[in-house]
Amino acid sequence: MAPLHAGSEHIISPSQPQPDFLHRPTVRKVLPFVNGGLAGVMASCVIQPVDMIKVRIQLAGEGVKSVSGAPKITPISVARDIIAQGKVLDLYSGLSAAVLRQVVYTTARMGFFGTFMESFQNRAKQQNRKVTFSERAYASLAAGGLGALLGNPADLSLIRMQSDGLRPPEKRENYRSVFDALRRISRSEGVFALWGGATPTVIRAMALNFGQLAFYSETKAQLQRTNLAAPIQFFAASCVAGFAASAFSLPFDFIKTRLQRQTRDASGRLPYKNMVDCAMKVVREEGVLRFYRGFGTYFIRIAPHAMMTLLFADMLGILTR
C-alpha cells in the first residue's frame, strides 16, 4: 500500500457514529404515535368495566321521559345487573374493540397532537415567545377530529358489543370479537355503516381532546411557574383536564352512543335520522338533563383514563428519549 503524502487526495476521516434505532429521524417522527397508542391501550385495559357501565347507563330508559319517583339508575345497580345476568367478566365485554379503538384513535390523536405541538413550539421558539392557549386548542381539536374519524369503526363495534346484552337473548348478536363485529356489521348493513354516528363521534372527540390535552398542557405550563413538586403539578393538571374533558364531551358522547347503538326495525327505519334529530327527540321525550345522566360515572371513566394515558405517555416518552 503506497504511503500517503502531504496534499494527497486520499484523506482518512474518522467514521461518524451512527444514531441508534430510537434516534433515527424516521423513528422520532413515529414515536409520538406509538407511545400514544400504547398509553391508551394500557389505560383502557384498566378502565374498561367503568366504560361498560357508562354505556349501559346512557342506554337505559331510551325513549322514556324521566319520571319522579322512578327507580334511580346507579353505577352500582347497573354493575349488579350485568353480573347477575352473566358473570364478572361481562364487565369486560367489548375489550377487544376498546383495544383496537385505542390502537387507532389514541395512536392518531396523541401522535397528531405531539406533532402539531412540536411545530408550534418550534415556531414560538423562533419568535422568542411561549406557545399560546389558542395554539394548544387548535392542536387538540385537529388531533381529536382526525383520530376519531379513523377510529369510528372500532368505536361503533365497541358500542354494539357493550349494548348487545340489553337485547332479548334470542335477538343478541353474541359477537366473538371486534373483528367478528366489524365483519358482520359491514356484511349486513354495508361498509359505510361502520361510520355510523361519525359526526357526533368526531365532535365528541374534538370536545374531549380540547378539554383533556389543551387544558392539561396549559395547566401544566402554568403550574411550572410555581414551587409545587412535579408529581403534584401532574396530578392537578390531570384533574383539571379530566373535568374539562368530561364536561365538554358528555352530551356528544351520549348522542354518539344512541346513534351507534341503533339498528333498523322490521320496516327498515332507524330510530334517529341524524345527530340533530337524536338530540331533539331526547330533549322532547326524555328531558334535557338526560344528556348529563351518568356524569359521575363518565367523569370516573374519563378522568382516570386521561390521567393514566398522560402518565403512561410521559413514562414512555422518558424511556424512549
Image (cartoon, helix red, strand yellow):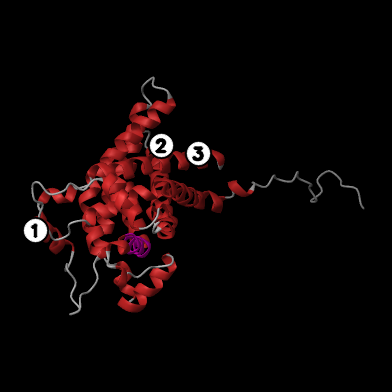
Secondary structure under the numbered disc 1 in the rendered image: helix
Inter-mark Cα distance, 1 to 3: 46 Å
- Earlier in the chain: of badge 2 and badge 1, it is 2
Residue 117 appears anywhere in the view: yes
- Taking the view exactly as shown, the residue that stands out farthest to the bottom is 267
Label 1 belongs to which residue?
A: 285
- Identify which residue is drawn at 31% across, 39% down: 242
Label 2 belongs to which residue?
A: 125
Closest to the camera, between mark 1 and mark 3, is 1
Label 3 belongs to which residue?
A: 315
Secondary structure under the numbered disc 3 in the rendered image: helix
How busy is the neighbourhood of tag 1: few (under 14 within 10 Å), some, or many (20 plus)? Answer: some
Q: Is residue 275 magenta?
A: no
Disc 1 marks a residue whose amino acid type is Glu
Disc 2 marks a residue whose amino acid type is Lys
Of residues 158 and 73, which is closer to you in this image? 73
What span is in magenta? 152-162
* Dominant secondary structure (helix, strand or loop) of the stretch shown in magenta: helix
- Identify which residue is drawn at 21% across, 48% down: 73
